[in-house]
Amino acid sequence: MAGIKEVAERAGLSIATVSRALSGKGNVSAKSRARAQAAAADLGFVPSYQASSLASGRNYNIGIVVPSVHRWYFSSVVEGVSRALLDAGYDLTLYNVTEVSGRRQSVLRDFLLRKRVDAVIAVALALTESEIRQMLAVHRPIVGIGGPLLGASTIRIDDYGLSAAATNHLIQLGHTKIAHLTGDSVYEQDFKIPRTRLTGFKGAMAAAGLEVRPEWVVTADFTIQGGYATARQLLGSASERPTAVFAASDEMAIGAILAARDFGLRIPEDLSVIGIDGHDLGELFGLTTIDQDPRGQGALAVRLLLEGLDGGAERAAVDTTYPTKFVIRSSTAVPPPAR
Amino acid sequence: MAGIKEVAERAGLSIATVSRALSGKGNVSAKSRARAQAAAADLGFVPSYQASSLASGRNYNIGIVVPSVHRWYFSSVVEGVSRALLDAGYDLTLYNVTEVSGRRQSVLRDFLLRKRVDAVIAVALALTESEIRQMLAVHRPIVGIGGPLLGASTIRIDDYGLSAAATNHLIQLGHTKIAHLTGDSVYEQDFKIPRTRLTGFKGAMAAAGLEVRPEWVVTADFTIQGGYATARQLLGSASERPTAVFAASDEMAIGAILAARDFGLRIPEDLSVIGIDGHDLGELFGLTTIDQDPRGQGALAVRLLLEGLDGGAERAAVDTTYPTKFVIRSSTAVPPPAR
DNA sequence: AGCTGCTGTGCAAACGTTTCCAAATTGTGC
DNA sequence: GCACAATTTGGAAACGTTTGCACAGCAGCT
C-alpha cells in the first residue's frame, strides 16, 4: 500500500524528486537518490504500473500473437521473446489466437488497440493492411516474424531460397524422385510460408529439369502426427515410391521418418528425409535440416522493437532476413540403386 | 486519441453517464445507453486500460508462471488458460521462468507484485510460503496447478494414486520386472511431482511384493530426448532387461519407445510402456497412458480465479483433485514368456 | 397533496505516477 | 564578491477513467 507519497515523506523529499531518483531520469543529487532509495526499500515500495503507464504512456509490456503454442516453431519464438523481454524488464502478453475464427479480429480490437501493449509481435500471422495502420496510428510498432506484413517491420527467413537449397541437396545426392510435404491449406490465408516453400521446391526441381509429380506433393498440418499420417499414405500407396522427401517443417519430417520406419524403410538407405526448422528432436532422429533458430528470431524481434521504442522517432519498416544454417545429419544420402 | 470526454460531448451526456453506459454498471436509461454506444462507435472509442485499471483497481489481466513452454504439459495448460481468458475478456501475461535461477525471485518482485495482474496461476512451481503471503497481502489470488502450494488454492491430479494405478496395470498384466523413468532432480526443488510418482510406483510394487531394482529407477528430464537417452542406457545395459517401463511422463515414455525400437524390441511384445499425461502424440505411438487433460486444468484454474475475483470475498484456499482417464492403447501387454 | 423510494444524471474526487515549469541552490570564471 | 550558468528541487498539472455523493424527476402510496 505504500505509495510514492509515503516514500517522499520518509525521505524528506518531494514526490517529484523521488520519482526522478527511482526512475533514474532527470538530475538528482547522489544524496537525494540514496535517501529515496533507502526509503523505498524500507517501505517495500513498488511503483504502480497502471499509474506510471497512465502518466508516461509507456507500458513496458509487449504483446505477441501466435496461432499455436504447441508447434515447436512457435513455442520457440515465444521462448526467445520471453527471455529477451524479461531481461529488459518488460512483460509479455500472450495472445494465442487459435483457428482462423473471428477470434482474431476481436483480439485485435479488444486487446491490442487498448494501448495496453507498447508493441506487438505477430508470428506467422498476416494482419491486414488496415489492421496494421490502426496499430501504427496509435503509435504501436509491429514486428512480424515469419509472415509477410505490409507496412510493418518483419523478420523472415528466405523461405524460397531455403526450400530450393534443401531440394538441391537431395538433387545433388542423386535423387530424382522427390516428394514434398507441404502445409495445411487451412493456414494459407494467414500464412504464406507453405506456399513459398512449395514454390522453392518446384523452382529447384524445374531448374534441375526434374518432374514434380502432383501425387508426391502432399499436404499435412505441420505437426508430427500430420506428417506421419500423410507420409503413410504417400509411402504406402501402390504406385511408385519417391526416394526422398522434403518436408516443409521438421515436425512433418519426423512424422515422415516414423512412417517410413513403419514400412520397414531404412533412413537414409531407402529414403532420404530433409526438413526445415532446427527442431530440438532433430538430433535424435538424425534429421538433416535447415536450422532457422526461432529463439534467436524472437530475441531479434524484441531488440528491434525496443530500439524503436527508445529511439522515439518512428522509423521506416525494415525487412530483415534472418540467417539460417544447413545442418547435415544422417537422414539424407544417395538414393538406393534403381531396380 | 478519442477519449471518453469526446464521446460524452458527442452524445450530449456527462462523462460519468457514458462510462456507466459503456461498462454496463449502474443505472442508465436505454436511450442514453444507445446514444453513448453510438457515439463511441462513431469515434472508434477504445477505453484506456491503464486509466480504467488505475481508477477501478481491476486489471483484467492474469499472470501465468511456467518453467517451460516447450514441454507438452505446460504448453497445454497455457493453451487452456489462454482460451478461457480470451473468452472472458482477460489478458494473459506469460512469465516463462526458465531454470531454477535467481530469475524466479526477480520475476516475482519486479513483475508480479506490481499490481499489474489481478491474479497468478503458478504451474508446477512451488512458491515459498512467504512469496504466497506477499501476493495474497496485495489481494492477488493464486492458483497452483500441478505443484503443491501452501496457503493457495491448487488444482492437482492424484499423482500417487495414478502412478500406483499405472504400475498396477503392468503388474496385473503379469509383469514383475518393471523399470521407472522418473524426473530430473534439477526440478525436484520446485517440483515434487516426479518424487510423488516415484513413491506411487514403489508403493504399488511393494504392495504386490515385487522388488524395485535401483538400477531400473532411472532419471531423465521429462523430454522425449531425455527419455530416449536414458532408456537407451537402461535397455542397452548388459544386465537383465526389464519387461515393462513406467515413465513419469508421456514424453519420456515416447522416448523409451523410440529407444526400444532402436534395439529391435517390439512394443508391446518385448516391452510394455506406459506413461502419464495424455500427450497428443500418444495415439501415434499407441501409448497406454493416463490422460490428465492439462487444457482442462488450465480452464478450471481460470474459472476458479475469476469466480474468486468477482465474488469479492477472499475465499479459503481450495484443493481440487482433477479427474484423469486411463487410456489403454497398444503399448502394454502381457510380458514375453520367461526364457 | 404530501411522502417515500426509485431511477437517471452530473459534479468532482479519487487512482498514483510522470513531467513541465519555475524557483532555489550550487558552482564557475573573473 | 559578482554575474551568470548549471544543477537540484518542488508545485502542480496532466494522464483517462471509475465511482461516491447529491440532486432532480417521477411513480406509487396513504
Image (spheres, coloured by chain):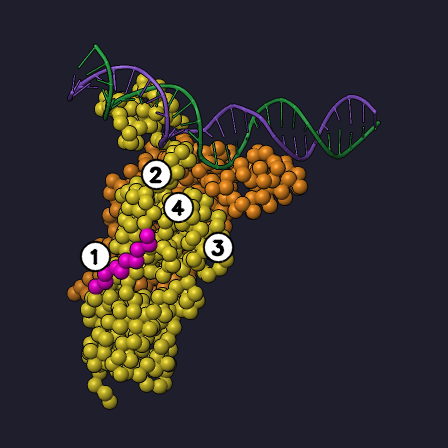
Chain colours: A orange, B yellow, C green, D purple
Q: Position of residue B290 (x, y in %)?
A: 24, 66
Q: Position of residue C17 (x, y in %)?
A: 51, 36
Q: Which mark is residue A215?
A: 1
Q: CA distance from mark 1 to mark 3?
A: 55 Å
- What amino acid is labelled 4 in the image? His
Subunit that carries the residue with mark 4: B
Q: CA distance from mark 3 to mark 2?
A: 29 Å
Between circles 3 and 4, the one closer to the viewer is 4
Relative to the observer, which residue lies in front, A285 or B17?
A: B17
Subunit that carries the residue with mark 2: A
Q: Is residue B320 magenta?
A: yes
Residue B244 is left or right of residue A9, and the answer is: left
Relative to the observer, which residue lies in front, B18 or B317?
A: B317
- What amino acid is labelled 3 in the image? Gln
- What amino acid is labelled 1 in the image? Glu
Q: Is residue A212 visible?
A: no
Q: CA distance from mark 4 to mark 2?
A: 24 Å
